[in-house]
């Protein structure tokens, strides 16, 4: 009887902790993908239909500004010879912030290890000569609080992920095949 009570209690804790599903992986890369001849790029971020849960409703607007600047900085750092050009660029990078789930700050603090995790999901499409040459969905999660910086709140956890997801996007755009190999290697560890 004691084991049954323990199992039911564990199940109840998992349910109340706030487990959240992520959107499915999606991505394609054209066989002839190359940005070797690219000199200019544009980067747009669409946040109009972002699904926000467990964070303040207007948080997506603030996060979009932070994420947009992080993506542009990461792209410049990863590709220093490519210049930002909004009018007639060689490469168009279109990003959509799909979802923000704040998770549970209490669960991250007291339980950790994935409980109460925050989730940010972003979809990126890379276009060259008016054709999509690569696209991918990126998901970033925070599973543990950052005690050193005092990052406990849901919004703080999501904000600390902005540079991480921006770097992933920039690495993918520079060389999507190498990025995918690196991801598979990381996933298998």
Image (cartoon, rainbow, N blue to C red):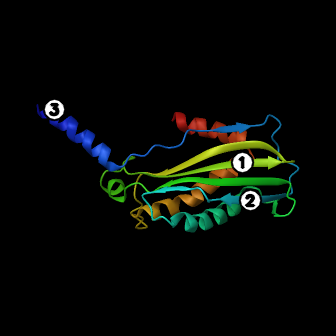
Along the horizontal axis of the image, is 38 left or right of 156?
Answer: right
Work out whether 1 lies above or below 104.
Answer: above
Q: Secondary structure at mark 1?
A: strand
Q: Mark on residue 69? A: none
Residue under label 3 = 3
Q: Quadrant of the N terminus?
A: top left
Residue 62, image quadrant? bottom right
Question: Which circle, 3 or 1, is nearer the viewer?
Answer: 1
Q: Secondary structure at mark 2?
A: strand
Crowding at label 1, few (<14), some or many (≥20) Cα neighbours within 10 Å? some
Along the horizontal axis of the image, is 6 left or right of 95?
Answer: left
- Give the CA distance from mark 2 to mark 3: 55 Å
- First-in-chain label (2 vs 3): 3
Crowding at label 2, few (<14), some or many (≥20) Cα neighbours within 10 Å? some
Q: Name the one closer to the observer, 59 or 126.
A: 59
Residue under label 2 = 43
- First-in-chain label (1 vs 2): 2
- Place of residue 35 in the rendered image (x, y in percent of width and height, measured from the top left): 82, 48
Circle 1/circle 2 CB separation < 8 Å? no
Q: Name the one closer to the observer, 187 or 95.
A: 95
- Place of residue 34 in the rendered image (x, y in percent of width and height, measured from the top left): 82, 43
Along the horizontal axis of the image, is 86 left or right of 108?
Answer: right
Q: Name the one closer to the observer, 54 or 153.
A: 54
- Place of residue 45 in the rendered image (x, y in percent of width and height, measured from the top left): 67, 59
Q: Mark on residue 125? A: 1
- Give the CA distance from mark 1 to mark 2: 10 Å
Residue drawn at x 72%, y 48% as measured from the top left: 125
Work out whether 58 lies above or below 142.
Answer: below
Work out whether 35 lies above or below 151.
Answer: above
Q: Residue furthest front?
A: 49
């Amino acid at each position: 009887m004691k084991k049954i009570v323990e199992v039911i209690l564990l199940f109840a804790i998992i349910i109340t902790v706030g487990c959240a599903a992520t959107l499915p992986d999606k991505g394609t890369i054209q066989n002839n993908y190359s940005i070797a001849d690219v000199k200019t790029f544009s980067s747009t971020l669409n946040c109009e239909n972002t699904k926000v849960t467990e964070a303040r409703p207007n948080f997506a607007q603030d996060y979009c500004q932070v994420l947009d600047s992080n993506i542009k900085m990461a792209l410049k750092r990863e590709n220093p010879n490519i210049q930002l050009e909004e009018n007639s660029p060689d490469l168009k990078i279109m990003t959509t912030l799909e979802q923000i789930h704040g998770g549970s700050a209490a669960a991250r603090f007291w339980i950790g290890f994935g409980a109460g995790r925050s989730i940010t999901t972003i979809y990126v499409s890379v276009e060259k000569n008016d054709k999509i040459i690569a696209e991918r969905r990126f998901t970033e999660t925070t599973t543990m609080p950052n005690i050193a910086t005092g990052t406990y709140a849901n919004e703080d956890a999501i904000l600390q992920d902005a540079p991480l997801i921006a770097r992933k996007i920039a690495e993918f755009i520079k060389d999507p095949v190498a990025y995918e190999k690196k991801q598979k290697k990381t996933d298998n560890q």
